[in-house]
Image (tube, rainbow, N blue to C red):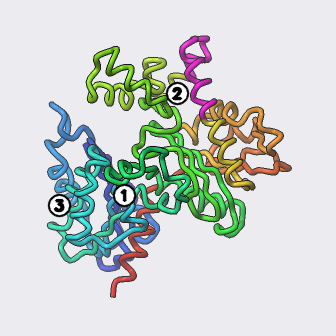
């Protein structure tokens, strides 16, 4: 259930700046305990609420984590919250009003905000004197221009139901774009980057001088790139057609597009490693899925290049982005006239690095994302400002 801790716990008589990060997902809870920049404990509780699996609910899981940690010298707790709507554009100190606002946003994130709330409530009760900070996945994207965030539907209806582009993976895009500027040795505010977070969930983001100006996920994480189980971009008529002609319920269509589409729908597996292995063996379905996946990325890179006007770097991150060299090569193939190229030898390496040729106009990077570290950084900044 809980992964073994890593590192040695700092002496209790000399605690540094300890921050606990909690990431409550729909069926899991990840945690990291930092002492300054050093991770002194971490783990994950999985299969929450599943028959014969893990803890019965998130409350039990979080209580178990807190009971098992040495929280001596804890200065703050940072909580990942998936949806902050338009209210939260930056991390905030949690109080009762913030909790109410997160609860009000549940219709926009019904699988995640309830779990996020439980984690916050349990931790506040257990650690009433420790500042709690909410870090929102959507916050980084509140800088989107209205033209980027607005869907072309009846304005009053959109306003009534909160229909607009919110974007997600914001903590990852912020961390990776900042690390890209560091890798280039340039000020963050001067660098234009296209970040590609390619995991089981996947999204692209255009970052202009540290500000998100375009992102592929929309009102929900369903829009945009092809993902492990999500379809990404889709003609809305497909939904109407499935309802009218197929007789599928709204819930069945929701399940189809979110849990039985993407790589899984095209190949029967949602793991890019398996797709690549099957493609190498000549499997036609895997080959098509790979091509669909990479073509979608190429389209977003081209669109974001046009929006930014000048691109200094393109950065791949997350599981697929960091480890699937064929995806990186195929996604950027044929873009030489835009100054974009991938060096095969560099692409085959490991670790944070530049994978474009030395003389490329656009630097292509691979950088490992670290959302928990970014959450800890932001939590520390908010908690440190108290008083």
Give the residue furthest to the right.
Answer: 359
Mark in front: 3 vs 1: 1
Q: Which residue is mark 2?
A: 273
User: Residue at 52% across / 58% down in the picture?
Assistant: 146
First in sequence: mark 1 or mark 2? 1
Q: Which residue is mark 1?
A: 85
Label 1 Cα crowd, 10 Å radius (few <14 / some 14-19 / many 20+)? many
Looking at the rendering, the stretch of residues picked out in magenta corresponds to 276-296
User: Residue at 36% across / 20% down in the picture?
Assistant: 242
User: Residue at 25% across / 61% down in the picture?
Assistant: 69
Q: Which residue is mark 3?
A: 122
Where residue 291 appears, as percent x and y from the top left, is 62, 24
Q: Is residue 168 visible?
A: no
Q: Is residue 148 left or right of residue 40?
A: right
Mark in front: 1 vs 2: 1
Q: Mark 3: which secondary structure?
A: helix
Q: Is residue 162 above or below residue 100?
A: above
First in sequence: mark 3 or mark 2? 3
Give the CA distance from mark 1 to mark 2: 34 Å
Q: Is residue 81 left or right of residue 146?
A: left
Nearest the eye: 127 or 341:
341
């Amino acid at each position: 259930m809980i992964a073994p801790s890593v590192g040695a716990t700092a002496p209790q008589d000399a605690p540094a700046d300890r921050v606990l990060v909690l990431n409550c997902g729909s069926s899991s809870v990840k945690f990291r305990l930092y002492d300054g920049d050093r991770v002194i404990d971490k783990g994950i509780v999985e299969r929450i609420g599943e028959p014969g699996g893990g803890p019965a609910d998130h409350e039990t899981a979080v209580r178990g984590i807190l009971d098992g940690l040495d929280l001596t010298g804890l200065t703050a707790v940072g909580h990942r919250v998936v949806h902050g709507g338009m209210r939260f554009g930056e991390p905030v100190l949690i109080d009762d009003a913030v909790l109410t606002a997160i609860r009000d946003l549940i219709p926009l994130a019904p699988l995640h905000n309830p779990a996020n709330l439980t984690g916050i409530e349990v931790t506040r009760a257990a650690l009433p004197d420790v500042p709690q900070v909410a870090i929102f996945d959507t916050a980084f994207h509140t800088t989107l221009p209205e033209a980027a965030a607005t869907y072309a539907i009846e304005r009053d209806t959109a306003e009534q139901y909160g229909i607009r582009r919110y974007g997600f993976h914001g903590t990852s895009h912020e961390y990776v774009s900042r690390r890209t500027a560091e890798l280039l040795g340039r000020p963050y505010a001067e660098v234009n980057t296209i970040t590609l977070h390619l995991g089981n969930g996947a999204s692209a983001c255009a970052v202009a001088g540290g500000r998100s100006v375009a992102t592929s996920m929309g009102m929900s994480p369903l829009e945009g790139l092809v993902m492990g189980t999500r379809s990404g971009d889709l003609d809305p008529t497909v939904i109407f057609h499935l309802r009218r002609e197929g007789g599928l319920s709204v819930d069945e269509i929701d399940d189809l597009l979110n849990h039985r589409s993407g790589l899984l729908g095209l190949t029967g597996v949602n793991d890019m490693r398996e797709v690549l292995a099957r493609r190498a063996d000549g499997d036609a379905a895997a080959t098509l899925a790979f091509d669909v996946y990479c073509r979608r990325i190429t389209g977003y890179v081209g669109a974001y290049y046009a929006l930014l006007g000048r691109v200094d770097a393109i950065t791949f991150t997350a599981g697929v982005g960091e480890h699937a060299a064929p995806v990186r090569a195929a996604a950027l193939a044929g873009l030489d006239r835009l100054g974009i190229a991938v060096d095969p030898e560099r692409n085959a390496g490991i670790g944070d690095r530049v994978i474009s040729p030395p003389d490329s106009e656009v630097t292509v990077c691979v950088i490992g994302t670290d959302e928990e570290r970014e959450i800890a950084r932001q939590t520390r900044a908010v908690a440190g400002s108290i008083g």
